[in-house]
Image (spheres, rainbow, N blue to C red):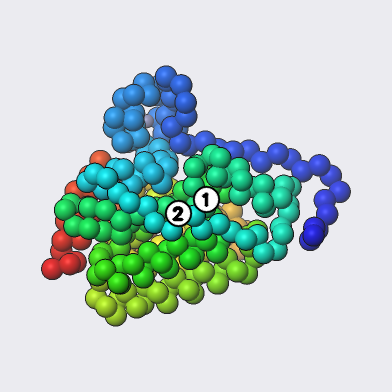
Amino acid sequence: MAWFRREHTPLPPKEQESRVPEGLWIKCSGCKEILYRKDLVKNMSVCPKCSFHFRISARERLDMLFDGAWQEFDQGLVSADPLKFRDTKAYADRLKDGKAKTNSWDALVSAVGPLGGMTTVVAAMEYGFIGGSMGVVVGEKVTRAVERSLAERRALVVVSCSGGARMMEGTLSLMQMAKISAALARLNEARLPFVSLLTDPTTGGVTASFAMLGDLNIAEPGALIGFAGPRVIEQTIRQKLPAGFQRSEFLLEHGMLDAVVDRRQLKKTLVRFLKFLLD
Ligand SMILES: [Zn+2]
């Protein structure tokens, strides 16, 4: 069922690729320097010249954080497309494309494994899957990751990378915010630590729920973090926004984050935080 009809052919959406693309050489989006791909990957996809943090996939993130082998759980949860939604393309086809592109069934990979020697539950969002948007599956998977932490008394880390709630699932995607927040409240009552890592970008309903509910909220440098986009805010308040608005460093300065951590120091820092919180 189409909910609205367009008279004109819509413009094809421009995809901005900030992930490390294929090929031998890559131009850095930060300093425009031409980089050798292998050097960049060796440097955790951080530009060796200007420290620009390229976006990485959920699986790369998990490989980077865990000490060694990790185990994925809730792998096969799939959206039922309850609204049979279609915009410029059927939602069912977008789901299929996402699977082909990322080798995941939805925009989050939940895993358990050793982190600094401590068995830890880590869920990482996958931006390559419909912009890392949060629908019913992401909501359910985060909730189950919380419940697993509770049952096994483990610390929880969630890595956010998301454009927000998934409009193709309408209000059902918004309900995930309350569901996850309620589960996190139970984790808090059980005195188990939850560290939220915000990466570029973390916006919309994800920021408005679990991404900002960590015992510690930490971010990667230069990440876009916010609820509404800067253009919408500018138009609403009719004021020019300050430079660096909605970037990690700005949010840290204004008390919205606990730390901004370079990716190359991330694991070490995370282990230190978790040890402190678990003591
Ligand atoms: Zn650079």
Give the quadrant of ligand 1: top left
Q: Which disc is residue 75 wearing? A: 2
Whole-percent x and y of residue 242?
46, 53
In the displayed orientation, state which residue is furthest to the front. Answer: 76
Q: Residues within 10 Å of mark 1 (few under 14, many from 20)?
A: many
- For the residue pair 66 and 232, the one nearer the viewer reads as 66
Whole-percent x and y of residue 279?
13, 68
The answer to whether the residues at label 1 and label 2 have Cβ atoms under 8 Å apart is yes
Callout count: 2
- According to the picture, the residue beneath numbered tag 1 turns out to be 105
| Residue at horizontal 34 percent and vertical 24 percent from the top | 38
SS type, badge 2? loop
- Identify whether 170 is placed above or below 42: below
Whole-percent x and y of residue 180?
44, 70
Residue 107 visible (yes or no) = yes
SS type, badge 1? loop
| Quadrant in which residue 96 is drawn | top right
